[in-house]
Image: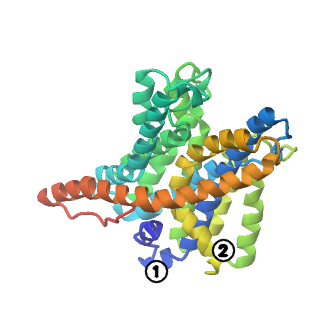
């Protein structure tokens, strides 16, 4: 699996790849959980529209913070980048190689689905909730630059790409940190990101890009960086402590009517800290048993990027078809279940048939060219993976 290669290329404090890969299944299951929670959140939102059209009651998901999956993804990203690139800190050419590797991994599917969205907007603009916007907005969407669409909404053409705008920002910062030895690099990264988050309190919201990039949510990536350092230090915990961390971390999925809520605390604390606990438990806790449900979840985790980006292409058409064909004959809750299952099946097919071969081809072109340049310059190429 792609993620297996990505993780196993990292080395723990003793340089043992086998030990560093022990948490593979745990993190895969966590990726599946994160992506699925986002899909379910959007499926429940679609039931509200469906309920208005059919007269049936929508599914009340107000007690759940299903967007918590995004916070898990951000912490996971900080963890994976630090762990897989730990041996690259301070090496010549490492920043460019790292950034190209990440672009080759993230860009192809995103650009493909953004283009599909644009073609759909041209063919049937009435199906879009929010207009595509100007040419500058389209270009900003392709190049991961925050840009407004609609009224007060900072989202690209493919709306879910707002998270990738933060991802790419983190990749730039992390690539710069690779110029330094790992300890100094992490210190520099920490000072930079904390400083930007503090600056965000002073920024005029009308400055769209600066206000977006200085949101304290960027600190969730930093949580993942420090979880990776804990993992690489060799710290491990038993099943009981790991389950305790998981139990606390899962509170991130709940809207709690206490001081620990979205109003009293910013998102990076309300959701970022529980997400960090989940990733920490997955990384340094005991591995989940290789039973069928766990392996199925791990397989979905491998397709989590496809699931995250592509599920709106299933949910919205299914909602329109459901309203026309079934109407109010069945409760919207069944729609949420069926549409989520359909999105999962689409993601698995998209991953195997499109994302995996497309990414491999782009990586071969981009990384192969970069590797040849590094060798011709007399540099030893860094440990490459097909999927890192």
In percent of width and height, residue 243 lies at: 74, 71
Q: Is residue 140 visible?
A: yes
Left or right: residue 104 compared with residue 210? left
In percent of width and height, residue 196 lies at: 53, 35
Q: Quadrant of the C terminus?
A: bottom left
Left or right: residue 285 compared with residue 179? right
Please state which of residues 157 and 185 is positioned toward the viewer in this rendering: 157
Please name the colour scheme applied to the rendered image: rainbow
Please rate how many residues cluster around mark 1, counting C-alpha atoms within 10 Å: few if below 14, some from 14 to 19, many from 20.
some
Residue 283, picture quadrant:
bottom right
Q: Secondary structure at mark 1?
A: helix
Q: Which mark is residue 18?
A: 1
Dot 2 or dot 1, earlier in sequence: 1
| In the rendered image, the vertical position of residue 337 relative to residue 247, given as above or below | above
Q: Quadrant of the N terminus?
A: bottom left
Q: Secondary structure at mark 2?
A: helix
Q: Which mark is residue 293?
A: 2
Please rate how many residues cluster around mark 2, counting C-alpha atoms within 10 Å: few if below 14, some from 14 to 19, many from 20.
few
In percent of width and height, residue 226 lies at: 55, 58
Please state which of residues 180 and 201 is positioned toward the viewer in this rendering: 201
| In the rendered image, the vertical position of residue 101 relative to residue 173, given as above or below | below
Q: How many marks?
A: 2
Left or right: residue 192 compared with residue 335? left
Residue 280, picture quadrant:
bottom right
| In the rendered image, the vertical position of residue 55 relative to residue 303, given as above or below | above
Q: State if disc 1 and disc 2 touch (CB < 8 Å).
A: no
């Amino acid at each position: 699996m792609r993620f297996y290669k990505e993780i196993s290329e990292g080395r723990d404090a003793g340089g043992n790849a086998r030990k560093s890969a022990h948490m593979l299944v745990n993190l895969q299951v966590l990726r599946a959980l994160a992506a699925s929670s986002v899909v379910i959140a959007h499926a429940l939102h679609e039931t509200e529209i469906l309920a208005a059209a059919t007269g049936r009651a929508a599914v009340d998901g107000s007690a759940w913070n299903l967007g918590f999956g995004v916070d898990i993804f951000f912490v996971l990203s900080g963890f994976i980048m630090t762990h897989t690139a730990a041996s690259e800190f301070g090496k010549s050419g490492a920043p460019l190689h790292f950034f190209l590797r990440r672009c080759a991994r993230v860009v192809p599917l995103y650009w493909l689905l953004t283009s599909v969205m644009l073609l759909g907007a041209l063919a049937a603009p009435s199906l879009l909730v929010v207009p595509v916007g100007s040419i500058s907005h389209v270009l900003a969407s392709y190049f991961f630059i925050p840009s407004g669409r609609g009224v007060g909404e900072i989202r690209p053409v493919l709306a879910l790409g707002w998270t990738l705008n933060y991802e790419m920002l983190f990749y730039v910062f992390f690539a710069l940190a690779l110029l330094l030895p790992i300890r100094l690099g992490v210190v520099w990264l920490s000072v930079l990101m904390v400083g930007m988050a503090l600056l965000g309190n002073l920024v005029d919201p009308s400055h769209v890009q600066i206000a977006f990039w200085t949101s304290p949510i960027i600190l969730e990536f930093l949580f993942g960086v420090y979880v990776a350092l804990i993992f690489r230090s060799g710290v491990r915990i038993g099943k009981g402590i790991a389950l305790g961390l998981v139990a606390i971390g899962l509170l991130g999925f709940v809207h709690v009517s206490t001081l620990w809520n979205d109003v009293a605390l910013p998102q990076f604390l309300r959701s970022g800290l529980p997400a960090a606990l989940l990733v920490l438990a997955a990384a340094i806790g005991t591995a989940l048993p290789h039973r069928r449900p766990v392996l199925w979840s791990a397989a979905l985790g491998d397709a989590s990027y496809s699931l995250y980006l592509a599920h709106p292409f299933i949910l919205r058409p299914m909602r329109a078809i459901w309203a026309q064909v079934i109407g109010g004959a069945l409760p919207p809750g069944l729609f949420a279940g069926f549409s989520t299952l359909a999105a999962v099946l689409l993601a698995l097919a998209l991953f195997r048939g499109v994302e995996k071969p497309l990414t491999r081809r782009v990586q071969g072109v981009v990384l192969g060219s970069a590797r040849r340049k590094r060798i011709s310059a007399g540099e030893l190429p860094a440990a490459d993976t097909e999927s890192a």
